Amino acid sequence: MTEVRVQEAPFDAGAELNRFSAGRSDLGAVVSFTGLVRGGPDGALIRMEIEHYPAMTGPAIEAIVSEAMQRWSLGDALVIHRFGPLEPGTQIMMVATAARHRADAFAAAEFLMDYLKSRAPFWKKEITREGAAWVEARAEDEDALSRWR
Amino acid sequence: MIDIVYFAWLRERIGLPRERIETDATTVGALVEELRGREERYALAFSDLSAIRVALDQELSDFDAPIATVREIAFFPPMTGG
């Protein structure tokens, strides 16, 4: 019932959300998050390049989603994550959760985001006018996981 | 025979995305030692293990893990998804 997509192509977050919510008269809450490529100061970022580990990415995200489905009372969950070259302002990824009540939908969406940041095998490289550099993982992102343990 | 895959700056430093090797190493750590001894680029890539994560057959693992039955080992920096 849940859906995980890893793709190079753009997606339409609005259309995905409408489709995700359609016909769910059993549920009362849908929460969604859309991540964008954040531009650097003064337009320094030319593009972001996202690399991933194809054999692991899908299964790793599926495992995170099933953990969320077990922890909260969710009716459904959707994760879309892109890879490849992405320009500032474009959508990288989205998460949507649906539940009978909003508290479950909000908490599960945050959990999914925290885990996707540090446990899904993606790596970001920033291409700026000065050159290219791999984005380093932040200690805060690892700390964010500790609240779910 | 075991497949080794590298991602992000590890792939760039070593200069290839994937290789198949014959090894007698019994753990991830022993395999890393063996790779380090091969060539300078491996020694440089594996100089700081705290900056490297490992997955065995697509599951996150650690450097103490045995590799006898493993088909694919992946080395990569901490993940930066989302």
Image: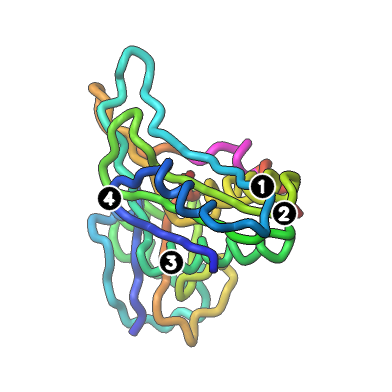
Tag 1 or tag 3, which sits nearer the N-term? 1
Please provide percent x and percent y for residue A67.
Answer: 66, 64
Tag 3 or tag 2, which sits nearer the N-term? 3
Tag 1 or tag 4, which sits nearer the N-term? 4
- What residue lies at 43% left-to-right and 49% top-to-bottom? A16
Label 3 belongs to which residue?
Answer: A56
Label 4 belongs to which residue?
Answer: A9
CB atoms of marks 4 and 1 within 8 Å: no
Q: CA distance from mark 4 to mark 1?
A: 28 Å
Q: CA distance from mark 3 to mark 4?
A: 19 Å
Q: Give the image's coloring scheme.
A: rainbow
Please provide percent x and percent y for residue B48.
Answer: 48, 49
Q: Is residue B50 visible?
A: no
The type of residue carrying mark 4 is: Ala
Label 1 belongs to which residue?
Answer: A29
Q: Which residues are magenta?
A: A137-142
**Same subunit, tags 2 and 3:** yes
Label 2 belongs to which residue?
Answer: A100
- Assess disc 4: are there few (<14), some (14-19) or many (≥20) residues with their C-alpha within 10 Å of its C-alpha: few
**Chain of the residue where label 2 is placed in the rendered structure:** A
Q: CA distance from mark 1 to mark 2?
A: 6 Å
Disc 3 secondary structure class: helix
**Same subunit, tags 4 and 1:** yes
Disc 2 secondary structure class: loop
**Chain of the residue where label 1 is placed in the rendered structure:** A
Disc 1 secondary structure class: strand
Quadrant housing residue A124: top left
**Chain of the residue where label 4 is placed in the rendered structure:** A
Please provide percent x and percent y for residue A84.
Answer: 28, 47
CB atoms of marks 3 and 4 within 8 Å: no
